Image (cartoon, coloured by chain):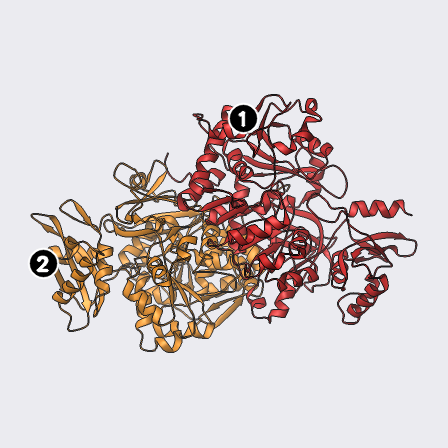
Chain colours: A red, B orange
């Protein structure tokens, strides 16, 4: 071999990480610890075992587990075997789990034993699965699934198979994203796209105030079935960071692990942050940890960010989606924002942020023209970057809607301010349009969240004969809160110029709890159904 | 256009930077300031002008200038026009300048007016140059060079030419690297390689203690004709940093600019650092600046690093070469080193460091086997990364020596310690071999540099009937220093186990000044000639 053939593959990333940081640790809940070197050996063994099981280039391998070191092994081993890792969304209903596995045509499926009952109920329907690999922490399991192997036997076995030559354009991962309507859609990413996302995100997560560096201890709290756990399983190893996997999420266990493992950085949706800071023992574990948290998935309500700050947690926000690998923006500070007083900087931490390196992002009106950078004018967010999905799996129609004129159309509505910071104000489909004007539900939700006594809130549109639509707020709160209290609070915000008067909801509906989507967001689809069936 | 076609091109990097940080500043000595947006417009205009001048894909464009904003414009505009930027080494002799331009077949050449005399002396020999573009800060110039244009007219003109479609595999840059023997050899890099180097270096320069972030103010002091100014003209814009260009190096001017522009980060060879910290007014300008400096090109002598520290300058070290784009390693801290006391960390700052993201690096013996990670065993440094040059221009023989079995053979000798830190101990060709054992001249030079009164030092080998070679030290020093003083100092270091007894030079030759190479290193070739002619 002559010349430079070191391409952008997962295998090259891992080999480099293991050579550069051989003694760095990957820890499963602080209980099972591997060095990068040992991890590399295990991954290599698993990749070879896959080849010996008959896995060939382009085959899909399903993986069903919590956030474990096994899942982490698959993140590397499956692409290195030439196959595509299908991270199965375990928060879906059994029917949707089956649908996505069938749609992906998973040839081999890895399952944690506690998920066996879901699959065994419909064992015969999984006739497209040739082999099952089962993992049990107890070491023992029983299954009626045919052709099943033990994960531990497989990875600890001797495997002489050669790995196929890696190509950076091999499809490395696939997973399904649920829209607000219709069946989940599959997206996929090549090895090259993953490496570029890793490099781009690492280069930008290092900016103030996230300051991500190789001496950090990382424990993401973003499900590994969901958009590569935001890319951190690759970013952390490339940077040589200590990496901690939380397993199945248990709030108290997570708090304990943060303290015992010295976790310094995490990523999560607002709901998880809410659960952490609301835990009665939170202060015991978080104080002194100086944890930095990057929030994504939905907007970070100011009230929650303030509560986190009181516990010493520094929050910033990111924006992206399943189609974008996912990171597009992070609310790190530009030179301009760095010079602002801390209170103003806090406002910027709550915005979706600035595009990361090599992400080109615009907010455009219906004609495709950029809207003014005034922090007010709402348009659709469109983006280009070298790591966005090429399209939906077996779905030309939606792919055509996604990519127009070389830009990915996110379907999200946002504003850009004069300093270039993006705010995501709504999903295009969630926006309430009243009298021809958008009412940005994320902003009005954020405003309501700062009213004392409010726990969670979601605003949706209700058909209105005069205005087309008017906003209705669903609220969970402390016992005594009334709609009139919220109204009073919002009117103050109208007076101070923070929101428009016509954004104030017509109605408040108090609920005990919200139905959540598989990624922990409030499920507005469910609320809409409730509203329409009550009319 | 459907799907994701946002490839790794210089044009995409610049467009993204201008969109993301439109108001950030590129400053020429603090005197001429452009926003990124304005810079983008100028670059686009220049690229179109080049196309209108007849430049076509793959043509080489020579550029002869100090570190100016014009040169910076060419860094972007030439690749965007489809051509290759040849950064001409202005520190070469006129003969070598001519040789490299002829070898590269420069079709259009940009020249700063003060370099005209060198070219005009041999105007007729430059028959391969079709067009000259001349820049003068005074706005006026006279030349006998045929077909010459004024840079300002060109960039300020109206150009309607379309830029050719960019391909990430287009060759973007070329320049010549002088070995210790023979004529300079040309290396070249594609747009993809430059973008990947940008991403990889940005991701790792952010680690402790360099901490490079978007809020830094960057002024590299690495000539722009030399290995992409270590990549910073691309890294800084991708990250949205304020960028300062120093023009022709003038130590007092540089010190003033550091203060007036609030420079926080720079990169340079040890000689430049020596000149900065030795300036009588250094303290006035550097105190309070909290400057972080990354040193490369040669090893950083401990004495110099300590002197810099006393002025508040934090140093780290990098390693790379023309063939590697250039960055391979930086002495940022791993988790392990981060936990050490500051005094021990200081030792690590002086090492060449750890490989940056996606760089795989080994130190191997003659059989290609990795040497033990003991910080002692010396071997050749070999590397892989997605941004190493594919080979030498029109030179298959040397390309074959460079790339063997998929690894780039650097020809540098080094050690790896148990924490994975590289130390470069010598160029293979510079090493002194005494009694069959290597004497690492960089280590012995470093040891001599810590002797009070020593300014600069270079150790070379002298033929010896018994030992094959023995080391001889050339030293510039304070007036009273004697060889016996240095010997006493080195014997102390032998006793403390820092160096081996047989490394102590047989002879000290005191010189007033050293001849330097074009990159500011002591020219050992000249010393060898002096030594052999005196024998």
Q: CA distance from mark 2 to mark 1?
A: 70 Å
Using the rendered image of the protein, determine whether residue A193 is visible from the camera's viewpoint: yes
Q: Is residue B5 above or below residue A80?
A: below
Q: Secondary structure at mark 2?
A: loop
Name the residue at 48% across, 41% down. A8
Residue A286 image position (x, y, % from top left): 58, 58
Q: Which residue is mark 1?
A: A55
Q: Quadrant of the N terminus of chain B?
A: top right
Observer-nearest of B66 and B8: B8
- B275 with respect to B469 (left or right): right
- Residue A164 visible in the snapshot: no
- The quarter of the image holding the C terminus of chain B is bottom left
Does residue B199 appear left or right of residue B90 in this picture? right
Count up the numbered dots. Answer: 2
- Of B193 and A126, nearer the camera is A126
**Residue A144 in picture, x, y percent from top left:** 64, 22
Q: Which circle, 2 or 1, is nearer the viewer?
A: 1
Nearest the camera: B132 or A102?
A: A102
Q: Chain of mark 1?
A: A
Left or right: residue A294 versus residue A397 is left
Q: Which residue is mark 2?
A: B534
Q: Residues within 10 Å of mark 1 (few under 14, many from 20)?
A: many
**Quadrant of residue A490 in the image?**
bottom right
Q: Nearer the viewer, residue A133 or A395?
A: A133
Quadrant housing residue B485:
bottom left
B276, above or below A316, in the image: below
Q: Residues within 10 Å of mark 2 (few under 14, many from 20)?
A: few
């Amino acid at each position: 071999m002559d010349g430079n053939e070191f391409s952008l593959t997962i295998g090259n990333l891992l080999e480099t990480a293991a050579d550069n940081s051989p003694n760095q640790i990957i820890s499963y809940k602080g209980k099972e610890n591997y060095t990068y070197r040992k991890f590399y050996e295990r991954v290599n063994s698993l990749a070879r075992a896959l080849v010996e099981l008959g896995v060939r280039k382009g085959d899909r391998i399903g993986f069903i587990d919590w956030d474990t070191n096994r899942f982490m092994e698959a993140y590397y081993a499956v692409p290195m075997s030439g196959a595509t890792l299908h991270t199965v969304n375990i928060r879906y209903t059994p029917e949707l789990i089956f649908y996505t596995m069938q749609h992906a045509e998973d040839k081999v499926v890895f399952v944690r034993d506690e998920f066996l009952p879901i699959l065994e109920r419909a064992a015969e329907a999984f006739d497209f699965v040739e082999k099952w690999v089962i993992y049990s922490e107890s070491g023992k399991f029983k299954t009626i699934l045919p052709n099943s192997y033990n994960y531990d036997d497989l990875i600890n076995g001797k495997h002489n198979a050669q790995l196929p030559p890696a190509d950076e354009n091999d499809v490395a991962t696939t997973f399904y994203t649920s829209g607000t309507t219709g069946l989940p859609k599959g997206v996929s990413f090549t090895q090259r796209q993953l490496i570029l996302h890793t490099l781009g995100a690492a280069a930008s997560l290092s900016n103030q105030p996230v300051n991500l560096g190789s001496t950090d201890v990382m424990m993401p709290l973003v499900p590994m079935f969901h958009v590569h756990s935001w890319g951190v399983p690759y970013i952390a190893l490339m940077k040589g960071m200590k990496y901690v996997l939380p397993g199945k999420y248990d709030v108290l266990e997570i708090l304990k692990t943060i303290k015992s493992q010295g976790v310094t950085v995490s990523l999560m949706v607002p709901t998880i942050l809410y659960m952490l800071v609301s835990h009665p023992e939170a202060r015991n574990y978080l104080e002194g940890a100086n944890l930095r948290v990057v929030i994504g998935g939905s907007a970070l309500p100011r009230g929650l960010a303030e509560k986190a700050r009181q516990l010493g947690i520094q929050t910033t926000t990111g924006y992206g989606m399943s189609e974008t690998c996912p990171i597009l923006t992070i609310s790190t500070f530009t030179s301009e924002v760095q010079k602002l007083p801390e209170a103003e900087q806090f406002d910027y931490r709550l915005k979706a942020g600035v595009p990361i390196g090599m992400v080109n992002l615009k907010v455009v009106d219906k004609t495709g023209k950029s809207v003014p950078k005034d922090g007010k004018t709402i348009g659709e967010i469109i983006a280009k970057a070298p790591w966005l999905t090429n399209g939906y799996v077996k779905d030309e129609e939606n792919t055509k809607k996604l990519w127009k004129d070389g830009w990915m159309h996110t379907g999200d509505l946002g504003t850009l301010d004069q300093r270039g910071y993006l705010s995501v104000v709504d999903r295009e489909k969630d926006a309430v349009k009243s009298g021809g004007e958008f009412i940005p539900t994320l902003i009005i939700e954020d405003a309501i969240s700062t009213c004392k006594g409010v726990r969670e809130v979601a605003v949706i549109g209700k058909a209105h004969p005069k205005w087309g639509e008017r906003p209705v707020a669903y609220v969970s709160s402390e016992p005594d809160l009334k709609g009139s209290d919220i109204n009073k609070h919002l009117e103050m915000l109208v007076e101070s110029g923070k929101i428009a008067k016509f954004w104030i909801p017509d109605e408040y509906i108090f609920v005990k709890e919200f139905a959540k989507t598989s990624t922990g967001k409030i499920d507005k689809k469910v609320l809409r159904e409730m509203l329409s069936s009550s009319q």
